[in-house]
Amino acid sequence: MIFWKNNSDYSYEQWIVNRLETIGASEVGVIVYGNAYASNLELFYSKIGAPTKPRVENIRMFLGKKTEPLNQMMYEYYEGSDQSIVDNHNAGKKIRETISRNETCFNTDYPHLSATPDLEVQPVLRNASRGKGFCEQKNTTSYYLNSFETGLPTDNVLQLCTQLMLGNDPNKAPEYNYGDLFYFVDNMRFELHEVEYSDIKNMEELILAHTIPFWESVKAARPLYNQLFEAQRNYNQRLVNELTAAITALEPPPQTSTGYLNFLSEKYKD
């Protein structure tokens, strides 16, 4: 069963707590591969309740948030080139219609996962025959895109595939047939990459193969971490050592990413 929860019903603090109850679509890539900024190990400790350093919003993240409404409009008129946005807008020729739902999707077939798509693409205009879809908007740089052999960030593809998994009942005809990645590159140009739901079976298997054991480890480690906190508070060093070893045994497999090595260095330095 698929159901949606409106994020407007929650305060920011409640929304943060809710994020601990599942693996979000944007976190899947961190678990599967890791990246230069985050790792499965850091996410593991965050999910079991360990204090984490707050992420500092950089200018790229700030611009990404502030330009979302503008990028949404650009996406609706985009038809293969930057110039097409100008021409179609001036001609009043909208290519696709989108809505921002501000809702998180859950699917009882994948109870450990959740997804909050940026946009829902409506089955009208050019997309009438394609049906409904999702769109993720990204503000990025050419340097970052070129760091991937395909020119497409793996994290973003996994995020979109997770959204399509959760939005569709595998036993019924798909409600969401595709997902789009719409990039604003270097604050100068746009790129559109399309993913069909019918093509993501291998990605589904990859996602589940990594996220299910990760989540089982998180659930097993949470009560141990609570006990560890109490043991530290009571200066029971023997129990602290035993619980630390038990939690360490539940850690996800090592990654070779920069984010993993950086977190490991910080963890043991602390």
Image (cartoon, helix red, strand yellow):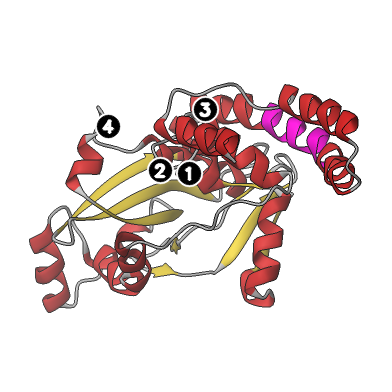
Residue 1: image x %, image y %?
74, 49
Q: CA distance from mark 3 to mark 1?
A: 14 Å
Residue 221 lies, with reference to residue 8, above or below; the image says above
Residue depth check, mark 1 versus mark 4: number of the one nearer the observer: 4
Vertical relation: 222 (above or below) 6: above
Question: Which corner quadrant of the image does residue 173 belong to?
Answer: top right
Report if the CB atoms under discs 4 and 2 are less than 8 Å apart. no
Q: Residue at x 51, y 50 (%)?
A: 176
The number of numbered discs placed on residues in the rendered structure image is: 4
Q: Marks 4 and 2: which is nearer the front? A: 4
Residue beneath label 3, please? 201
Which of 133/146 is in front?
Answer: 146
Marks 3, 1: nearer the viewer: 1
Q: N-terminal of the two: label 2 or label 3?
A: 2
Q: Nearer the viewer, residue 210 or 176?
A: 210
Report the residue at 40% width, 43% height from top: 156
Task: Confirm or deny contact between disc 1 and disc 4 (CB under 8 A).
Answer: no
Q: Which residue is mark 1?
A: 159
User: Label 4 belongs to which residue?
Assistant: 148
**Residue that mark 2 sits on:** 156
Is label 2 or label 3 in front?
2
At 76% across and 30% down in the image, what residue appears?
247
Mark closer to the chain start, 3 or 1: 1
Amino acid type at image mark 4: Phe
Q: Which of marks 2 and 4 precedes in the sequence?
A: 4
Q: Is residue 119 left or right of residue 63?
A: right
Q: Quadrant of the C terminus?
A: top right
Instruction: Give how far across and how far down residue 251 sits, in percent.
Output: 68, 27
User: In this picture, which residue range is highlighted in magenta?
Assistant: 212-222
Query: Which class describes the residues within 10 Å of circle 3: few (<14), some (14-19), or many (20+)?
Result: few
Name the secondary structure under disc 2.
Answer: helix
Indicate the amino acid at tag 3.
Answer: Lys
